[in-house]
């Protein structure tokens, strides 16, 4: 399959932005979504299988994949609720998995026994629990739970044999948990002051002392990553003295801090193998993840397996340190699971997740581009050009806005984006100011400016598209989810003539209500959100000025909204009120609600219905404008 993919790419001989000499075959949304999505990787105790999560049936469940290759075997069989695999038990065949109810994000940790029976280890109607990791001796695992107080997450330890919770730390302040040392002595936490300023704290379980360990001045992000297996260092990310995040470490015995790895981009993560023989480091290099592998303690760089154009993600090591599991994806290839044998120097592909009915030659590659905004600030973006788009056959286009606000549109496979491009729509994934991955200064450039400068970046994105020569300037819409949904609504109300249509996926229409109704388990981030976006009490007037719901009278263009009924982040009332107001005004609005989804749509049947309905809306109100 890989050779076929390489041959296709070579035969096409094209980069994104260069018109192809062929008209691609078109596929349905059902065909695109028949491609399997996967996540996670946990080696079994005998290292003969890997536990993953996959939506093979249309609902995410846990699956077992043989390391030597072979068919996926379902481990859980939920027909209704999204189920994610967490981990194999290190010394037996039991499994931990998580599951919420209809997307409400109140996930619990469940035990799956070899006989197929399931047990909820973290019961409670309002409980949200998150798996952390196994203890170094592999006799217990750690997890977080807000069962005591919905606003705060306590740290628990549960012995593998007794399966009884033991509270290790009780939080009443609002820390974000960051890890536990292998010897069990230290707990690492972060405490955000703002979304761009945070400190790291260490809790000593022997002395019960909580100590700040990253003193600094100004806005500096500090985030704990991992302890080394010998419990000598805490590795953490910081941009103290730099515009980009680098990997540093704190020597626990002395408090000495030093840089370990610094690049001209943000370091995203660091992960050790079980005994510390290997360390994997991820770098966010211009909207794609680049993984670097080192052999410790000397820090010698290890060559990764040769792969085609794309990116390696989600690196996991076997406990013996003989193997490494990872996912690999490209613009035309979804994430597939590989296992790399260090001794043999061979990467074995374990899955082929692309729907075989789809020819990769009918898909397109993305291109990283940049354009000047209204104030000459350079805005990075990801461009997808339909193969048939050219000067005499100009394409309609969508400005695609990510969530966040501090998210990032990256390269790599997206079934939904490829679906719209395959049906003739150009896509420009905008990383407006405030997006992550481009340094601290760029990340902070949207603070308390939402509805203004970041939105104007999107308007300038339309101008960039219109100037390409192969995009129809009269047929450019805007689409996004969550914060990107807000940007869509803001565009149609605050810049009502800029875009031809808008598609809002569970976006904020009323900032005051959204900030007042954030989930209780976001307590640690509450003040940071207020600092960036606005305080719903102190800044009420300012927030109303940039809330689309209060400016519906300005809407001139067709709008479509998709919403999950159980969304705890952007509640259904945000969309309900917007739809009602547009209808009252006599505007054009279409509305799709999924009763069994939350913030984002995970069930394939809903994805097919929702994204298919979006294409019909676009074909009617965007592609149909002015012919074409």
Image (cartoon, rainbow, N blue to C red):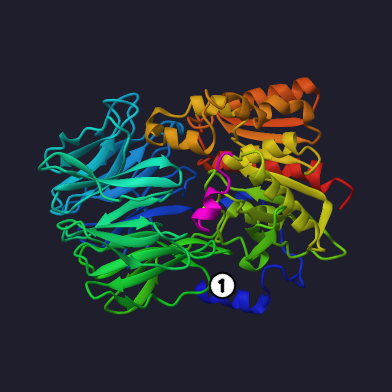
Residue at the spot x=67%, y=26% of the render? 549
Residue at the spot x=60%, y=30% of the render? 593
**Residue that badge 1 annotates:** 5
Callout count: 1
Where residue 259 appears, as percent x and y from the top left, is: 32, 65
Front residue of 329 and 151:
151
Residue at the spot x=76%, y=39% of the render? 495
Q: Is residue 80 left or right of residue 366?
A: left
**Quarter residue 591 falls in:** top right
Per the rendered image, the range of residues in magenta is 437-448
Where residue 524 appears, as percent x and y from the top left, is: 37, 35
Could you tell me which secondary element the residue under label 1 belongs to? helix
Front residue of 392 and 480:
480
The magenta stretch spans residue 250: no
Q: Is residue 242 left or right of residue 131?
A: right
Where residue 537 appears, as percent x and y from the top left, is: 52, 23
**Quarter residue 4 falls in:** bottom right
Q: Is residue 287 left or right of residue 159?
A: right
- On the question of residue 121 being in view, the answer is yes
């Amino acid at each position: 399959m890989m050779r076929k993919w390489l041959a296709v790419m070579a035969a096409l001989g094209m980069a994104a932005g260069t018109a192809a000499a062929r008209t691609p075959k078109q596929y349905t949304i059902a065909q695109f979504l028949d491609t399997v999505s996967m996540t996670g990787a946990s080696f079994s105790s005998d290292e003969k299988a890997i536990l993953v999560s996959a939506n093979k049936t249309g609902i995410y469940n846990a699956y077992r994949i043989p390391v030597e290759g072979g068919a996926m075997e379902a481990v859980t069989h939920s027909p209704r609720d999204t189920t994610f695999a967490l981990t194999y038990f290190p010394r037996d065949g039991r499994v931990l998995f998580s599951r919420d109810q209809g997307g409400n994000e109140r996930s619990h940790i469940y035990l799956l026994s070899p006989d197929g029976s399931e047990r909820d280890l973290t019961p409670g109607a309002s409980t949200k629990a998150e798996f952390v990791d196994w203890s170094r001796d592999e006799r217990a695992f750690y997890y977080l739970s807000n069962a005591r107080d919905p606003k705060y997450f306590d740290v628990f330890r549960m012995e593998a044999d007794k399966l009884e919770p033991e509270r290790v730390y009780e939080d009443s302040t609002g820390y974000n948990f960051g890890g536990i040392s292998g010897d069990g002595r230290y707990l690492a936490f972060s405490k955000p002051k703002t979304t761009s300023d945070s400190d790291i704290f260490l809790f000593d379980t022997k002395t019960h002392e909580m100590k700040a360990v990253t003193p600094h001045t100004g806005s500096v992000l500090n985030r704990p990553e991992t302890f080394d297996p010998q419990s000598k260092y805490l590795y953490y990310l910081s941009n103290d003295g730099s515009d980009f995040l680098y990997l540093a470490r704190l020597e626990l015995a002395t408090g000495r801090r030093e840089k370990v790895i610094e690049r001209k981009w943000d370091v995203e993560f660091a992960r050790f193998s079980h005994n510390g023989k290997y360390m994997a480091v991820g770098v966010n290099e211009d909207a794609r993840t680049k993984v670097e592998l080192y052999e410790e303690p000397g820090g010698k760089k290890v060559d990764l397996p040769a792969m085609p154009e794309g990116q390696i993600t989600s690196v996991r090591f076997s406990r013996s340190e003989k193997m490494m599991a990872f996912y690999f994806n490209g613009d035309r290839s979804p994430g597939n699971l590989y296992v790399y044998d260090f001794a043999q120097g061979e990467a074995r592909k374990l899955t082929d997740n692309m729907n075989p009915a789809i020819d990769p030659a009918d898909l397109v590659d993305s291109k990283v581009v940049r354009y000047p905004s209204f104030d000459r600030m350079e805005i990075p973006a990801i461009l997808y050009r339909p193969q048939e788009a050219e000067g005499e056959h100009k394409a309609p286009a969508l400005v695609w806005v990510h969530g966040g606000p501090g998210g990032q549109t990256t390269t790599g496979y997206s079934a939904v984006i490829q679906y719209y491009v395959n049906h003739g729509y150009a896509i420009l994934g905008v990383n407006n100011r405030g997006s992550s991955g481009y340094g601290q200064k760029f990340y902070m450039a949207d603070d308390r400016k939402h509805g203004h400068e970041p939105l104007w970046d999107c308007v300038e994105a339309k101008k960039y598209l219109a100037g390409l020569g192969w995009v129809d300037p009269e047929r450019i819409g805007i689409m996004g989810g969550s914060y990107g949904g807000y940007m869509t609504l803001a565009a149609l109300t605050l810049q009502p003539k800029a875009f031809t249509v808008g598609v809002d996926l569970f976006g904020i229409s009323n900032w005051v209500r959204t900030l007042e109704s954030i989930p209780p388990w976001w307590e640690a981030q509450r003040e940071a959100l207020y600092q960036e976006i606005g305080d719903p009490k102190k800044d009420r007037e300012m927030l109303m000025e940039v809330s689309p719901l209060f400016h519906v009278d300005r809407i001139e263009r067709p709008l479509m909204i998709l919403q999950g009924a159980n969304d705890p982040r952007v509640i259904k009332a945000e969309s309900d009120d917007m739809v009602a107001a547009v209808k009252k005004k006599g505007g054009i609005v279409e509305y799709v609600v999924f009763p069994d989804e939350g913030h984002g749509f995970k069930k394939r049947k809903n994805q097919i219905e929702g994204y298919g309905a979006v294409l019909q809306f676009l074909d009617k109100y965007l592609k149909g404008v002015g012919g074409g």
